[in-house]
Amino acid sequence: MRNKTSVRIGCGSGWWRDRIEPAVVSAKLGQLDFLCFETMAEATVSFAQARKRADPGFAGYETLLEERMRRVLPHCLAQGTRIVTNGGWIHPVAAAEATARICAELGHRNVRITAVVGDDLTQRIFALADTVMESGAALETLRPGLISAEAYAGADGIVQALDEGAQIVITGRVADPSLFLAPMIHAFGWSPHDVDLIAQGSAIGHLLECGAQVTGGYFSDPGFKDVPDPWNLGLPIAEVSANGDAVITKVQGTGGRVDARTVKEQMFYEVHDPSLYLTPDVVVNFLTARVEEIGEDRVRFSGATGRARPRTLKVSMGCKEGFIGEDWFFYAGPGAMARAELAKRMLEERFRMVGLEAQELRIDYLGVNAVHREASPPMDHEPYEVAVRVCARTRTREMAEKIGGEVDGMAVSGIAATGKRLPFNDRTREVIGVWSTLVDRDAIDFRLETIES
């Protein structure tokens, strides 16, 4: 695809549990050159590592990857659309093997699938870094609870895989914008040293990475920012030119909207300093960008500039940090608030009686003070119904289980008309904390493993 003048790149997901149907619509009707699935958040890899420890049968890749592939592959392979995803999580090779099996089952032979491997630094991190970014503490303090350490890779491995003919590229931890930047570098032959082009491509990737957020998802505010047919949001597509300019759009007829406001909101989403947005590939300056509406659901985006990529790569580390016990119960009708307040007092006393040792205990009233807590405004009416959420963070599972045990007691040793929720088997969970450090980018050794269906 080198030296093309333009490409169409679509987003297939903005996170792990994103809806699949809009990606099928884009694969079928979007006339895409590339379809990219972003499936990670900061804690996703740690979740996968923790699940792998508890369940050796867990394959290690995104839990929806096989379903996504089954749904989009027939359209993508028929139209020559290439797929890029970081859904390999902690086992990209296994994800590639599963995708190859699906291709074969669907009757598609000789499909070239490449896994990009090398982001997992769990066994080497203490030799590569020494400081926790968030606290300044010695990295060694995390050793007892360390579960995983993964570097945020950039576009390089994906570009190499595409250059070598991969039709599907599956990675582990790759920075979100890099998934979309890589196809641009591959298609246009951009030099990694042309920082303004790489910055513009990364900025486009940032607009696409959160899926429907740029097409009206996470935007709608009824009466202030209305979105047409929000139940049928289309996923974004970028029509990218070789000079880096792009038009952000979506499949015609899908719900949602693409306008200057949706683009600007996404442009600054999760951006601490818009003049200094750090990625593994470049440092982006969004303040020079231009956003221009050129038609219905069509916004031209151009002008982002950049600086040379950082010397280091960020590494996210998942660590065991105790347990959470959580349960809920409900009151409705006259006096619901008074019953909820008495229930809170009863539980606080009972937790003392059973010796609950908690680093933090919260008993909140949903709909009253659960979100803003002490900053919540005084109630000017008596709520008709109240949900009581009880949650504690503890060092041991045994202590966390005391939450559900005492809430169970409210069923017959509580207050009139206590409504109890089910099931009982999801009330205690392990806490995985996420910490960061930096490593020299030359310490990361990425490699490609290719499989054919």
Image (cartoon, rainbow, N blue to C red):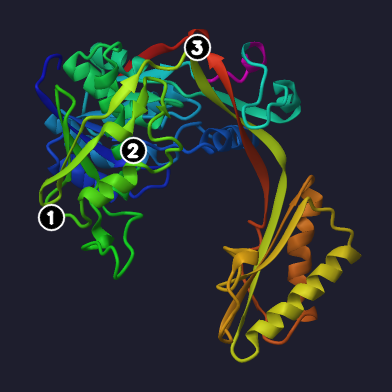
Please state the horizontal and vertical placement of residue 34, each as a whole percent of the image: 21, 30
- Magenta stretch: give its range: 120-127
Q: Which of the numbered marks, if any, corresponds to residue 209?
A: 2
Relative to 109, is 427 above or below?
A: below
Q: Quadrant of the N terminus?
A: top left
* Residue at x-position 14% and y-position 22%: 242
Tell me the distance, in whole angstroms, between the alpha carbons under discs 3 and 2: 24 Å
Image quarter for residue 49?
top right
The disc, 2 or 1, on the residue closer to the chain's N-terminal end is 2
Please state the horizontal and vertical placement of residue 398, each as a whole percent of the image: 81, 51
Tell me the distance, in whole angstroms, between the alpha carbons under discs 3 and 1: 44 Å
Q: Which sits in the foreground, 99 or 370? A: 370
Please state the horizontal and vertical placement of residue 238, each as a whole percent of the image: 19, 36
Relative to 39, is 173 above or below?
A: above
Look at the numbered disc 3 and give the secondary structure of its residue.
loop
The answer to whether residue 302 is left or right of residue 13 is: left
Of labels 2 and 1, the one closer to you: 2
The disc, 3 or 1, on the residue closer to the chain's N-terminal end is 1
Relative to 248, is 157 above or below?
A: above
User: Disc 2 marks which amino acid?
Assistant: Glu
The disc, 3 or 2, on the residue closer to the chain's N-terminal end is 2
For the residues bearing labels 3 and 2, Cβ distance under 8 angstroms: no
Query: Which residue is denoted by mark 3 in the rendering?
Result: 444
Q: Is residue 124 magenta?
A: yes
Relative to 32, is 385 above or below?
A: below
Main secondary structure of the magenta stretch:
loop
Instruction: Using a 10 Å C-alpha cutoff, classify the residue at mark 3 as few (fewer than 14 neighbours), some (14 to 19) or many (20 or more).
Output: some
User: Disc 3 marks which amino acid?
Assistant: Ile
The answer to whether residue 222 is left or right of residue 344 is: left
Q: Which of the numbered marks, if any, corresponds to residue 253?
A: 1
